[in-house]
Amino acid sequence: MATRISILLANAIADSIGTSLNSGSIEIRTGAAPAATTDADSGTLLWSFTFDASAFDAAAAGVATNQEVWTGASVASGTAAHFRVKTSGAVVNAQGTVGSGSGDIDLSSDVVVSPGVITIGAGNFSITVPQV
């Protein structure tokens, strides 16, 4: 039988992850994500945003969600395909897919034209710790 964790522990873990990312950053890049978060960045950097010191809400039901709007100018043109979330020390702690109508982050358009602006609204990015 698998070990099961409580909602209290799932929330504590999600809060810890959110806290470790406060003052960190998110990058939107072209191409496939690297195989592991420890691998070097891949693809072309299209956009990045630095989080405030309290970027994530307190977790509920094992989910910590961004509480701020992330908006900024694109730095290159291309098709958004993956993101990387980094701590303030530039350590990659999470990565996933980006798409239009799909992906872990759903953009209104995955085609980025520079100069341009990308916005990820409050509540549109979350970190989930499953209760098992």
Image (tube, helix red, strand yellow):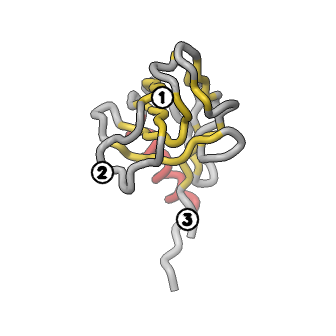
Image spot of residue 126 (x, y percent): 58, 43
From the viewer's perspective, is the residue at label 1 or at label 3 nearer? 1
Q: Mark 2: which secondary structure?
A: loop
Which amino acid type is shown beneath numbered disc 1? Ser
In which quadrant will I find the C terminus? bottom right
Ranked by sequence position, the earlier of labels 1 and 2 is 2
Residue under the image location 43 percent in, 39 percent down: 85
Q: Quadrant of residue 112?
A: top right
User: In this picture, is 47 found above or below 89?
Assistant: above
- Residue placed furthest toward the front: 78
Label ID, residue 38: 2
Ranked by sequence position, the earlier of labels 1 and 3 is 3
Cα separation, mark 1 vs mark 2, equals 25 Å
Left or right: residue 34 versus residue 110 is left
Q: Are marks 1 and 2 in contact (CB under 8 Å)?
A: no
Image spot of residue 94 (x, y percent): 43, 47
From the viewer's perspective, is the residue at label 1 or at label 2 nearer? 2
Q: Residues within 10 Å of mark 2 (few under 14, many from 20)?
A: few
Check disc 1 and report the residue beneath it: 54
Q: Residues within 10 Å of mark 3 (few under 14, many from 20)?
A: few
Q: Residues within 10 Å of mark 1 (few under 14, many from 20)?
A: some
Q: Quadrant of residue 43?
A: top left
User: In this picture, is 39 found above or below 25?
Assistant: below
Image spot of residue 67 (x, y percent): 59, 30
Check disc 3 and report the residue beneath it: 6
Which amino acid type is shown beneath numbered disc 2? Thr
* Relative depth, front residue between 85 and 77: 77
